[in-house]
Image (cartoon, rainbow, N blue to C red):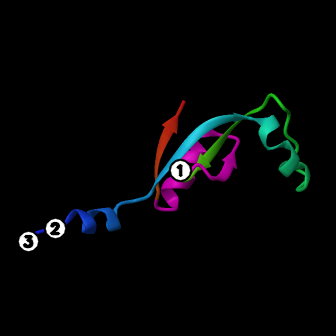
Amino acid sequence: MTVSTEDLSRDAAPTVYVRAIAGAEVMEAAAASDIRIAPDDTLYAVHDESGQRMAVFSDRNAAFAAARWHGAQPVSVH
């Protein structure tokens, strides 16, 4: 059986990037939903391959687990 690289890329889990962000980066959006975040809180954002932020978590492990749950392959960005 021959498998093309096109077949492999179609079946591969999308890569997402998890990086630490300061609470100040999402305070405005959080205020609209009554979530309280301090500017110096460390949060963990999940980004797609184009850099678009998709989700924010208060815990790094939760960010990785959520990405995997949704079929993505998370990697850490420092």
Q: Are marks 1 and 2 in contact (CB under 8 Å)?
A: no
Q: Does the segment drawn in magenta span residue 48?
A: no
Q: Residues within 10 Å of mark 2 (few under 14, many from 20)?
A: few
Earlier-in-chain disc, 3 versus 1: 3
* Closer to viewer: mark 3 or mark 1: 3
Mark 1 and mark 2: Cα distance apart in space: 30 Å
Residue 49 percent location from the top left of the image? 51, 52
Secondary element under disc 1, as helix, strand or loop, is: helix
On screen, residue 14 above or below 46: below
Q: Are marks 3 and 2 in contact (CB under 8 Å)?
A: yes
Residue that numbered label 2 is attached to = 3
Left or right of 38, for residue 52: left
Residue under the image location 47 percent in, 57 percent down = 72
Residue that numbered label 3 is attached to = 1
Q: Does the segment drawn in magenta span residue 50?
A: yes
Write the start and end of the magenta stretch as one range. 49-71
Residue that numbered label 1 is attached to = 65
- Name the quadrant of the C terminus: top right
On screen, residue 12 above or below 36: below
Left or right of 24, for residue 21: left
Q: Look at label 1 and name its amino acid.
A: Ala
Residue 55 percent location from the top left of the image? 66, 53
On screen, residue 23 above or below 29: above
Quadrant in which residue 13 is drawn: bottom left
Q: Are marks 3 and 1 in contact (CB under 8 Å)?
A: no
- Name the quadrant of the N terminus: bottom left
